[in-house]
Amino acid sequence: MLTLSSLAVSTSTILVLLAFVAALSGLVGRRRSATTRHTAGVPALVLASAGGPGQQAPAGVLDEPGSTDATLPSRPTTGWYAAALAHLALAVLTVGLVTRAVAVGHGPFANQHEFAVSFAWGLLLALAWTRWRHQADGLTVAVLPLALGMLLYAATVSATPNPLVPALQHNLLLTVHVLAAVIAYGAAGVACAAALLSLGRPVLVRLGWVGAPAPARLDELGYRAVAVAFPLMTVMLILGSVWAERAWGTYWSWDPKETAALLTWLVYGGYLHARVVRGWRGRRAAWLLVVGFVAVLFTYFGNLFLGGMHSYA
Amino acid sequence: MTMSHAVARSPLGVIWRFLTSKVTAIGLILTLGVLTLLGTLFPQLPDSARGNSMATAAWLDGIRPRFGDATDWLARMQVFGVFHSLTFTTTAAVLGLSTLACTLNRTPALWRQVARPPLHPSGHLLDQIHHSRRVVVATDPASVTASVAAHLRGRYHLVTTSTAEATDLYAVRHRFAPLATLVAHAGIVLVLAAAAVTGQVAFRDSEVAIVVGERHAVGHDTRLVIEAASFTDSYTEAGTPLDYASDLKLLADGRPVARATVRVNEPLRYDDIAIYQSFYGVAAVLQVSDPTGTTLFDGGVPLKWGAEDGIHTVGLLDLPLPGEQLAVVSTVSGKRDPLLRAGQVQIVTYRGGAETDRRVISTGVATDVGGLRVTFLRERQFTGLTVARDPGSLWVWWGAALLLVGMTITFSMRPRRLWVRITAHPSGSQVHVVTPARTTPTDADLHDPDSATLDELIRALTPASVETLPDPALIRK
C-alpha cells in the first residue's frame, strides 16, 4: 500500500510538471497567435461565437487564456491540456493520500512529508474548484508552480511513516483539524497566485501575454479564494484549540505554531476588512494576499526552526 | 447610529468615533499581527518561570549565547514575554472594545435593512445596482405580478409587494444573512472576554508530579486529592514514547469520587476540574531524618527536571525546616556517569539558598548529608499531571461557535435581492428587474447567483424583447 502511495505521489509530481509546461507553452502559443492575428489586421478582441463578426465580447471573457481559442473549437488547446493534466494529478494524488492513510492507519498529516503532499493536494483541489466555479484558467500557470514546489519538497524529506506520538493519537481531530488547514492553505495559494498575476501583469503584458486576466477579475478571484480560506482557517484554529484543551489542558498556550497560525489569520482578517470596509483593491490588496501566503508558508515551515509543542510534526 | 455635533465632540464621542473607526480596527489587527510575529520569532519565557526571578534569570542565561549583549535590553522591552506584555494585552483589549463598538454601531442599520427592507432601490443602493433588464410581456400587469411573485417564492425568496402608480416587488433570499457579521464579531468579543476571565479566575497547575502509590492535594479550595494508583508506558523500537497512562483515583474529603486511566487526549474530568496526563519520569524514594532521629520525609522525590548536561535529572524537596532544601541528582536512563553509577544518587543540601553539603549515596545506605540522615531506598515512577479549572473556557467555545456560524453564513449565504417594477404597456406589461452588484462591473463572467436568478426570471416570463439598461436610475422612485 505504501509503495502504491509513493508511486501515486511520484506520478502526480510528473503530471503537475507536465501541466505546468503545458500552461507555460500555452502562454507562448497565445502570444504568437495574438501576434499573428494582429499582423493579419484582425482585431484581437473579437469573439466569433459571441454574436457574429464584429461584435465586441463582454469585458473579461477574452481575458482568459483559452477563450480566444473559441475560434478553434475542434482542437483542444495547451491550456486545456494543462488543466486536464492538473486534474489528473489531483486524482492520482488523492489515490496516493488515501492509500497512505490506509497503510499508516490515520490521516496522512503526521509529518513534514505527509503534510507537504497534502498541501500540494489542497492547492490542486482549490485550483480545480476555482476553474469549475469561475472558469479561471488563467490562474493555472501561477498555482501549478506552488503545487510542484510542495511536491518536490516532499520528495526531499523522509517519507518513512512513524507511529503517532501520544499527542497526535486522536484520529478524528487529526483528520478534521489538518484537513481544514490543507484546504485553507490551498485556497490561500490560489489567492496568492491571483495576486502575483495581478502584480506581475504589467510585465507579462509588456512581454506579450495578451491573455493575462484583467486586474479587477484577479482581484475578485483572490477575494473569493480568501472567502473560502478564511473560514477554514478559523475552523482549523478552533479545532486546534479544542484539541489543545483535550491533550494539553489549555486551549491556547502561545506555542510558536499556534501564534504563527494566529498571525496568518490576522493577516487575512486584515485583508478582508481592508477590502470590504475600506475598499482596498488592486496592488495594495494583492500585496496583502502575498503577505498572507508568506505567513502560511512561515506557519508550515515553522516546525523546522520554531520548536515548541508542535515540533513533532 | 448618529450623534449630535456636541456629543460627537465630547470626550465620550471622540472615544466612540475612535473605537468605531474602520482605520482603528484595521490598525489594531495589523498591530496585533506585528506583535504576534515578534512573539513567534523570539523565544518566550515559559509559564513555569514567570513570576520567579531566579528561574527567569536562569532562562535568560540560557538564551544569552544567542542574543548576546542585547539579551537584557530585549528582556526589558518585553520581547521575551510579548503575549503577557502590557502592549499586547492593551492592543487585544482595545481590539475587543473596537469590535464591540463597531458591532453595536452597525446593528441598527443592519436591523433596518433586514426588518424594513427598501421596497425601491434608492440612495447608495442605486450605486450598487449591477444588473438592470426591462422586458415587455403580452400579459396584463396583475397576472405578471402573480407569476413573478410565484416564481421568486419558488426559489426561496421572500416577496413583498406594493402598488401605487406601478406595482413594485422586492424579493430577498437569505434575508437575515446580513446579521451574521454581527454574530461573528460578537463571537470574537466573547472569546476575548472569556480569555480575560480565564486569566483572572482559572488555575492551571502544569507541573503536578505524583509518585506512584502516593497522593497529592489539588488545593484551590477543592478538597480534592489525587492518588496515582499505577503508571504504564510503552515505546517504539527507536525509543519514542508510544503511550503513557496513569491510573488515577480522585478523592473528595477522603472518599473516592472518580477513577480513570488518564492519558494524553483522555483527561479525567470531575465537576469543573480536569486532570491531564502531561509528563512522567523516575522518582527517588528517600527517608530523611534530623539528628534527633525525627523523620522529616518518607516518600518519593520526582526527578522532573533535566540538567543542562543532558545526562542528569534533578528533583527538589522542601524540608519541614525553615529555609532547608534538598536536591536529588540521578543519571538519566541510558546515559553513563562514572561518578554516579546505577543504584546511586547524589544528595545536595541547601540552607537559605546556599549549598551546605553534597554526597553520593548508594541504595539502602543511610548517609549523613548536611546534618541530615538520608537513605535512598529505591527508584519508582512518577506521573506528571496538569490540573486545571477554567470556567472561562466554556464561554470561549460559545464565542468560537458564534464566530464560526456567523462567518460561515457571511461568506456562503449572502443576501440575494431583486427589485421588480411592473407597469402597464400597450402590448401587455413592462417588467423592469434590477439586482445589486455582487462583483466589480468587469467581472460579469464570474459566477453570480443574482445574475442567474434574474436571467431565470426573465426567461420564465417569455418576453417578446429584453432590454439591458445601463442606467438603473430609470426606476428611481
Image (cartoon, helix red, strand yellow):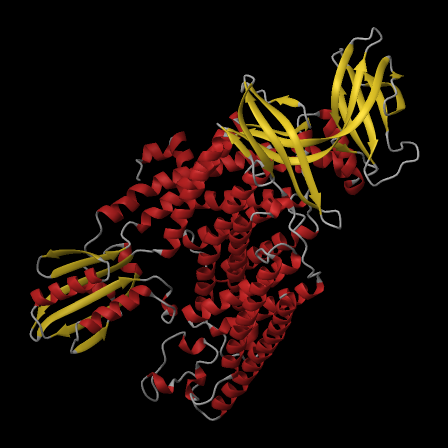
Quarter holding the N terminus of chain A is bottom right
Residue A299 in picture, x, y percent from top left: 61, 52
Would residue B355 be seen by someone viewing this image from the given angle? yes
Q: Residue at x 68, y 61 (%)?
A: A159
> Does residue B222 lie above or below B281 as drawn?
above
Residue B128 in picture, x, y percent from top left: 31, 60
> Does residue A81 lie above or below B24 as drawn?
below
The image quadrant that residue B469 belongs to is bottom left
Q: Nearer the viewer, residue B475 or B411?
A: B411
The image quadrant that residue B341 belongs to is top right
User: Is B60 positioned to the left or the right of B346 in the image?
Assistant: left
Outermost residue, top direction?
B292
Residue B395 in picture, x, y percent from top left: 44, 35
The image quadrant that residue A309 belongs to is top right
Would residue A270 be seen by someone viewing this image from the given angle? no
Q: Nearer the viewer, residue A175 or A103?
A: A103
User: Is A164 positioned to the left or the right of B400 in the image?
Assistant: right
Q: Residue at x 50, y 61 (%)?
A: A187
Outermost residue, right direction?
B338
- Report how many numbered discs are placed on residues in the image: 0
> Does residue B67 lie above or below B198 as drawn?
below
Outermost residue, bottom direction?
A40
User: Is B216 positioned to the left or the right of A82 in the image?
Assistant: right
Q: Nearer the viewer, residue A177 or B76?
A: A177
Residue A125 in picture, x, y percent from top left: 50, 66
User: Is B339 positioned to the left or the right of B93 in the image?
Assistant: right
